[in-house]
Image: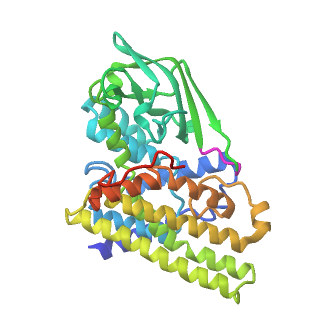
Amino acid sequence: MAANLRQEVRTWLADHAPRDWRARSTSEAAFLELQRSWFAALVEGGYAVPHWPAGWPGGGRSLAEQKVIYEEFARADTPRLLLSFMSTYHAASTLFEWGSKAQQQRYIPRILEGEIWCQGFSEPNAGSDLAALRTRAERRGDVYVVNGQKLWSTMGQFADKCLLLVRTSSEGAKQAGLTYLLLDLRAPGVTIRPIHQIHGDEEFAELFLDNVEVPVADRLGEEGQGWTVAQSTLASERGLTLLELSARMKGALWRIADLIRAAGRQEDAGILRDLGKLATRVDATCAVADQFLANRIAGEERVGDASIVKLAYARTLRVFTDLGVRIGGIDAQYHAPITYGAGMETGNWMADFMNSYAWTIAGGSDEVQRNIIAERLLGMPREPKGWTLREDAA
């Protein structure tokens, strides 16, 4: 069955996969057009949302089938769905789990029609400590009136809707006062400002909310249940997302080989040694991701397994892009084209290298992942007995 599906996907991609998409993604307008047209093609072909429940176009696929689909996308070197990622994973998964029938019927079909969602969680003083957020929502009859600021909203300047986490109470534990809302970014009082990054891209935006009214009907879960709902949103980016990214990394090793040839460094023993080490590390990362999936399929996934995959991918991605920058040399660093998108496949090695650091923070920093692994998998205490911090310690 898997072999038949693999051939089916491979045949479809041969006819529909975008060609020369890197050369077509050097302006914001071109990037947006490519992302939207590619997503529409995947929806029509039944490959846009294989992780959705059965009954939706292409949905209801098993984990093993999803793995085959993502592996074939990586093999065909297709562009990733960066513009609609939040919509098809974060928004849809949260709506499927927490949304009412009316909310699901209203919002989920629009995602397949191209409606874009972003995430309004982080704030200037509430990033790693999300429970410290201060954006407030006061209920007034049938609406919440929201005031505050959100930061690092991926693709927020292109979005139509926002998954918004707000504070509705200051009583009790910080997490207990949070509520989860669905925000229309076209509502009066919303201001969106793109964040210009050092390499020329504008992947993120900040949102300013000034007396913005959100209907109570657009609340997910009960008031004060936002922290629990938000955990479902964050969990949606784990699992097969990292499996796909690991497969894409392995499929992109040819780009390093091409770079070595273009730079005339085929006889450079140091570079060839580093390429060999990188290839081994990429294989190990893919093996970790494959084992994670196998555990999920067998129902043996442990709390912390996803953290191992996330940590392995983030660290390997940095090594991958670092080698690309070193081979390309000074010329590649200073004359790299502005490219929209990030990972290890844009064609702009310097941009990809700088973006690789984001993966050591986004979705939980490396330090957070190590703590989860230590506490949940290895059973290590937060403060081992007999350990004390010296008062004069620097």
Relative placement, left or right, of 14 versus 54 is: right
Position of residue 307 measured from the top left corner of the image (x, y, whole percent): 37, 58
The quarter holding residue 24 reads bottom right
Q: Residue furthest top?
A: 141
User: In terms of depth relative to the viewer, which is nearer, 265 or 297?
Assistant: 265
Position of residue 140 measured from the top left corner of the image (x, y, whole percent): 37, 10
Relative placement, left or right, of 276 versus 287 is: right
Q: Residue at x 46, y 33 (%)?
A: 162
Relative placement, left or right, of 314 versus 331 is: left
Position of residue 300 measured from the top left corner of the image (x, y, whole percent): 21, 63
Q: How many numbered dots are placed on residues in this image?
A: 0
Position of residue 65 measured from the top left corner of the image (x, y, whole percent): 31, 65
Q: Residue at x 75, y 83 (%)?
A: 264
Q: Residue at x 57, y 69 (%)?
A: 319
The quarter holding residue 320 reads bottom right
Q: Residue at x 61, y 74 (%)?
A: 255
Q: Residue furthest left?
A: 299
Q: Main secondary structure of the magenta part?
A: loop
Residue segment shown in magenta: 199-203
